[in-house]
């Protein structure tokens, strides 16, 4: 005997179609015969093949197991890695510490293993989400470059995703970064303002001190945590969020990030010393995620801190 509890996504389907979708090896002629013989029932009562099912209905099939072999399911996200460094999780969001070298989303070369696929696999394995039972797909509210590590916000439902996206845009979720830059900063802290334009063809940006056509304002706030004559360890808070803002802005003022092959001194190196290490929720209103208001979450064992303390950042 097998039973199916009708899910929200299957509600409205006919009895015969749900059975055939679930048990494709069951011959249609046998299915109709067993329905007539009352060996297939809905809510303990006789049913008909064309009867529409409602959410929560119990469909029971009193048949031999060999004809009730379920259709094997395969989803691309099941090929993703199980590695997922979770900093925090509740019924709405997951905060994930993304390691350097891992993509947030699939690209043309690496389709199956990325953060969003790992989140899908994780939630599917826990029984919290299924592509067959939910119209919503777990999604990321922010992204970080492949060669940058840091905290990613994954949302489990559409309401959370919309809210987090809105709060990121209104700067009510503060993002803090750690970076190691060449040289000693002149000031212990500062708020830098400039203008940035993206070159889509080169996938790079350029920065200007002057406001020009096509350039957007950027504001970058930094604080020196440690320094030497050759290097500085900075905490950076973005007051605007533009493509490659930290990397390009720091290079523009003469302090490029270590190992930045695109904007820095070390051509060909692509493990820029940059990490999105801390988030703070600073909501201005009451909302579905107000229980997070005022809370900070921080990634542990950030490689940049360790390398800086060991003196590994030296000018080439």
Image (spheres, rainbow, N blue to C red):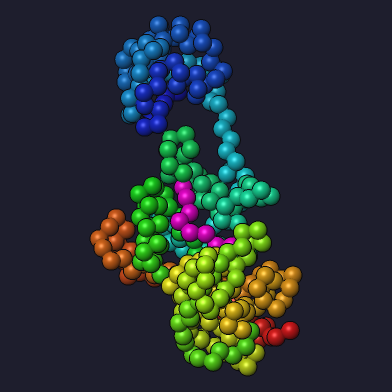
**Quarter of the N terminus within the rendering:** top left
Q: Is 278 inside the magenta-drawn segment?
A: no
Residue 276 position in % (x across, y down): 51, 69
Q: Reply above or below: 4 against 122.
A: above
Q: Residue furthest left?
A: 286
Which quarter of the picture shows residue 231?
A: bottom right
Q: Reply above or below: 5 against 110.
A: above
Of 255 and 159, nearer the camera is 255
Residue 10 position in % (x across, y down): 40, 28
Total count of labels: 0
Q: Is residue 124 left or right of residue 46?
A: right
Of 164 and 34, nearer the camera is 164
Query: Which residue is at a point 47% across and 34% down the rendered structure image?
Result: 132
Q: Is there any visible trace of residue 42 in the rendered image?
A: yes
**Quarter of the C terminus within the rendering:** bottom right
Residue 312 position in % (x across, y down): 67, 83
Query: Which residue is at a point 63% across and 50% down the rendered structure image?
Result: 107
Q: Reply above or below: 10 against 256.
A: above
Q: Is residue 224 left or right of residue 110?
A: left
Residue 269 position in % (x across, y down): 72, 71
Q: Is there any visible trace of residue 299 in the rendered image?
A: no
**Is the stretch drawn in magenta largely helix, strand or loop?**
loop
Which quarter of the picture shows residue 245?
A: bottom right
Which quarter of the picture shows residue 167?
A: bottom left
Query: Which residue is at a point 50% across and 91% down the rendered structure image?
Result: 187
Query: Which residue is at a point 61% across and 78% down the rendered structure image?
Result: 251
Q: Reply above or below: 114 against 210.
A: above
What is the magenta range? 138-145
Q: Is residue 237 left or right of residue 104?
A: left
């Amino acid at each position: 005997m097998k039973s199916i509890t009708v899910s929200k996504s299957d509600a409205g389907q006919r009895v015969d179609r749900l059975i055939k979708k679930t048990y494709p090896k069951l011959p249609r002629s046998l299915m109709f015969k067993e329905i007539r013989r009352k060996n297939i029932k809905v809510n303990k009562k006789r049913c008909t093949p064309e009867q529409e099912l409602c959410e929560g209905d119990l469909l029971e099939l009193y048949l031999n197991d060999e004809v009730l072999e379920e259709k094997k399911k395969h989803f691309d996200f099941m090929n993703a890695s199980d590695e997922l460094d979770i900093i925090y999780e509740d019924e709405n969001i997951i905060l994930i510490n993304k390691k350097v070298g891992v993509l947030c989303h699939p690209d043309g070369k690496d389709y199956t293993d990325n953060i969003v696929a790992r989140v899908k696999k994780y939630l599917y394995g826990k029984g919290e989400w299924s592509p067959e039972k939910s119209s919503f797909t777990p999604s990321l509210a922010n992204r970080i470059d492949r060669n940058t590590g840091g905290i990613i916000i994954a949302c489990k439902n559409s309401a959370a995703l919309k809210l987090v996206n809105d709060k990121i845009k209104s700067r009510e979720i503060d993002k803090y970064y750690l970076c190691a830059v060449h040289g000693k900063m002149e000031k212990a802290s500062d708020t830098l303002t400039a203008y940035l334009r993206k070159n889509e063809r080169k996938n790079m940006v350029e920065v200007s001190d002057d406001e020009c056509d096509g350039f957007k304002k950027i504001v970058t706030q930094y604080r020196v945590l440690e320094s030497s004559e050759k290097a500085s360890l900075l905490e950076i808070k973005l007051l605007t969020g533009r493509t490659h803002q930290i990397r390009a802005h720091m290079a523009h003022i003469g302090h490029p990030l270590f190992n930045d092959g695109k904007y820095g001194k070390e051509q060909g190196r692509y493990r820029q010393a940059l990490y999105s290490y801390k988030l703070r929720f600073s909501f201005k209103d009451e909302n579905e995620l107000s229980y997070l208001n005022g809370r900070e979450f921080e990634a542990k064992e950030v490689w940049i801190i360790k390398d800086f303390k060991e003196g590994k950042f030296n000018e080439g």
